[in-house]
């Protein structure tokens, strides 16, 4: 019954969930350096296992390797040409997603991306959707709601990844700040290998910001949050929705109190699907799922659904996706550019978990 609920919740009709169909092969591009690789892998694996219980023969191919720039593109191409992948799930890593989209542009293979960079939907690949909110809309939402009583406009500091990923995030956050009539005073790049945060914390405190946007992967964001709070930062702290994660709460410890992230608005039925997913995930893997795992699950289920319901020769014409479906991370609706349509609400860390606060965005 749970498998049927999750399959239907991912967009499969009861009739489609009850009948066998042709084989479906989904490719998951998973670079070794991807910080949330475990969540991505587990979410996709659970999706394949669940749909196979009630629907058809689906399989998952996972590739990714260390190499020079472009290696992820080679792995994406091998999944399509050698492994027979009919659709791809691309990770939060922006460079990997762009390479997967290059392959998709040449092969017309559909892609569901978990990358929040605004540049992803400007690549011109029409058979792509993004299953996560963009950095631009999450940043604008947070900065519009978290009005600090500091200089007008309030000045924030942002912590972003180093290298190209950080530049993409900084670009989007600067646009978000302008749209929210606020200002980013400074942007600091933080290496994923950094373990000593003393100098960084001192620089941030010297800026005396109204708040800090900690736009990093969950574990690194948790470590930075802990360092900032223990050093006496009293301002607001906020980050992307992916920080709604057990990894963030574990890394930040008791210092997570008051940290704010955007969360997607879900109705009662959506809450039920999410609980069923969390229970199934915990039973299967023995750990708690995070938002990235839920989105990876939804991405995989959505692609299985598209491939099952659409003749191969008509796949390209199935986009943009016009109908919505029910995912475990919320309703799956997309605009004509493939961006997910979302309504957001504030979630704040209280007593070791994130709780909804404030009004919702329509």
Image (tube, grey):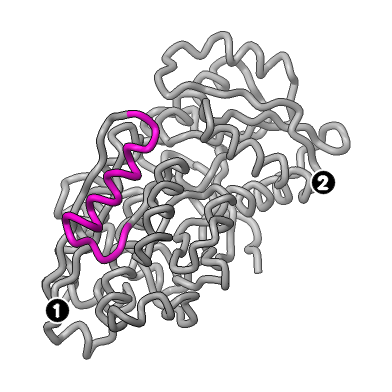
First in residue order: circle 2 vs circle 1: 1
Residue 79 is one of the magenta-drawn residues: yes
Dot 2 corresponds to which residue?
181
**Numbered mark located on residue 327 in the image:** none
**Numbered mark located on residue 22 in the image:** 1
Residue 210 is one of the magenta-drawn residues: no
The one nearer the camera, 152 or 54, is: 54
When asked about the image quadrant of residue 297, the answer is: bottom left
- x 78%, y 45%: residue: 178
| Highlighted range, magenta | 68-88
Percent of width and height locating residue 27: 25, 56
Q: CA distance from mark 2 to mark 1?
A: 52 Å
Q: Secondary structure at mark 2?
A: loop
Mark 2 or 1: in front is 1
Percent of width and height locating residue 359: 65, 61
Side of 253 relative to 82 (left or right): right
Percent of width and height locating residue 360: 63, 63
């Amino acid at each position: 019954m749970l498998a049927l609920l999750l399959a239907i919740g991912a967009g499969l009709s009861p009739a489609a969930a009850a009948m066998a169909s042709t084989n479906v092969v989904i490719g998951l591009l998973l670079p070794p350096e991807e910080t949330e690789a475990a969540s991505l892998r587990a979410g996709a694996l659970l999706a394949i296992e669940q749909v196979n219980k009630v629907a058809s023969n689906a399989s998952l191919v996972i590739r990714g390797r260390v190499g020079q720039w472009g290696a992820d593109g080679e792995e994406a191409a091998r999944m399509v040409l050698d492994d027979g992948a009919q659709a791809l799930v691309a990770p939060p890593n922006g460079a990997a997603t762009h390479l997967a989209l290059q392959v998709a542009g040449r092969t017309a293979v559909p892609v569901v991306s978990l990358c929040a960079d605004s540049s992803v939907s400007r690549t011109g690949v029409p058979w792509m959707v993004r299953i996560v909110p963009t950095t631009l809309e999450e940043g604008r939402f947070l900065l519009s709601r978290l009005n600090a009583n500091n200089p007008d406009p309030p000045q924030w500091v942002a912590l972003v990844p180093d290298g190209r990923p950080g530049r993409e995030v900084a670009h989007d956050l600067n646009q978000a700040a302008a749209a929210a009539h606020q200002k980013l005073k400074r942007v600091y790049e933080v290496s994923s290998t950094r373990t000593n945060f003393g100098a960084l914390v001192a620089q941030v405190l010297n800026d005396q910001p109204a708040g800090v946007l900690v736009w990093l992967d969950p574990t690194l964001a948790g470590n930075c949050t802990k360092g900032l709070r223990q050093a006496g930062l009293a301002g607001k702290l906020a980050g992307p929705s992916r920080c709604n994660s057990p990894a963030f709460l574990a890394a930040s410890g008791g210092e997570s109190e008051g940290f704010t992230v955007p969360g997607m608005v879900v109705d009662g039925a959506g809450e039920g699907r999410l609980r069923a997913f969390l229970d199934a995930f915990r039973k299967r893997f023995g750990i708690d799922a995070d938002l990235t795992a839920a989105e990876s699950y939804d991405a995989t289920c959505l692609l299985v659904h598209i491939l099952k319901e659409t003749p191969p020769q008509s796949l390209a014409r199935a986009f943009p996706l016009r109908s919505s479906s029910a995912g475990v991370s919320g309703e799956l609706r997309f605009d004509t550019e493939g961006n997910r349509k979302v309504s957001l609400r504030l979630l704040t860390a209280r007593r070791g978990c994130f709780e909804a606060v404030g009004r919702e965005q329509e």
